[in-house]
Image (cartoon, rainbow, N blue to C red):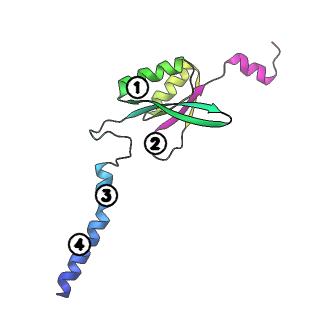
Amino acid sequence: MFLKNGISGIAGFLDLAIVPIKSALAGDPGSGQDPSGAVVRKIALVEEADGVSVEKVLFSGETDAVQSRAIELIKAGRKMVLEGFPLEEIAAWCFAHNYRWRFHNHFPAKNAFILEPGKNSFSDAKEAGAKT
């Protein structure tokens, strides 16, 4: 009898040890992925008032629709947070449209970046003290 209970106790312990592995392989529900396996991309506008930054989620969805909306906002010169986009894509957009990017450290977000309009060379020269 003791042996039977001891084995079942070990089996229960092994089940507990395997649960994190099973959940990691199945995918975390808060990982930014759709249950179908597609990556969900999000756009949030950053608005600053009285020294406080507020993020307002503007758009969330599949790749093609979100990409076109992000390009529209970049062309409009808006500061935003993009989530679920690959770094290569963000860097290419920033280079092409004179934007700056940095990582956004927000807990549930993965691959999140803050994008803001860059300064033009004329304003950079004025800040450096050049006479115009």
Q: Measure the C-alpha gap from mark 1 to mark 4.
A: 47 Å
Q: Which residue is mark 1?
A: 66
Q: Nearer the viewer, residue 83 or 93?
A: 83
Q: Give the residue drawn at x 72%, y 19%.
A: 123
Secondary structure type for disc 2: loop
Of the numbered discs in the image, which one, if any, rests on residue 11?
4
| Residue 130 located within the stretch drawn in magenta | yes
Which is more foreground, mark 3 or mark 2?
2
* Magenta residues (range): 109-132
**89 relative position to 114: left or right:** left
| Residue 131 located within the stretch drawn in magenta | yes
Q: Which residue is mark 3?
A: 21
Q: Give the residue drawn at x 66%, y 18%.
A: 120
Q: Give the residue drawn at x 25%, y 71%.
A: 12
Q: Position of residue 131 (x, y in %)?
A: 83, 15
Whichever of callouts 4 and 3 sits on the residue coming sooner in the sequence is 4
Contact between marks 3 and 1 (CB within 8 A): the answer is no
Q: Position of residue 70 (x, y in %)?
A: 46, 24
Q: Position of residue 31 (x, y in %)?
A: 38, 45
Q: Which residue is mark 2?
A: 109
Q: Residue furthest bottom?
A: 1
Label count reads 4
The quarter of the image holding the N terminus is bottom left
Q: Measure the C-alpha gap from mark 2 to mark 1.
A: 16 Å
Secondary structure type for disc 1: helix
Whichever of callouts 3 and 2 sits on the residue coming sooner in the sequence is 3
Q: Position of residue 118 (x, y in %)?
A: 62, 24
As shown in the figure, which amino acid type bears the numbered disc 1?
Val
Q: Answer above or below: position of 26 versus 20.
A: above
How dense is the environment of label 1, judged by Cα within 10 Å: few (below 14), some, or many (20 and up)?
A: some
The quarter of the image holding the C terminus is top right
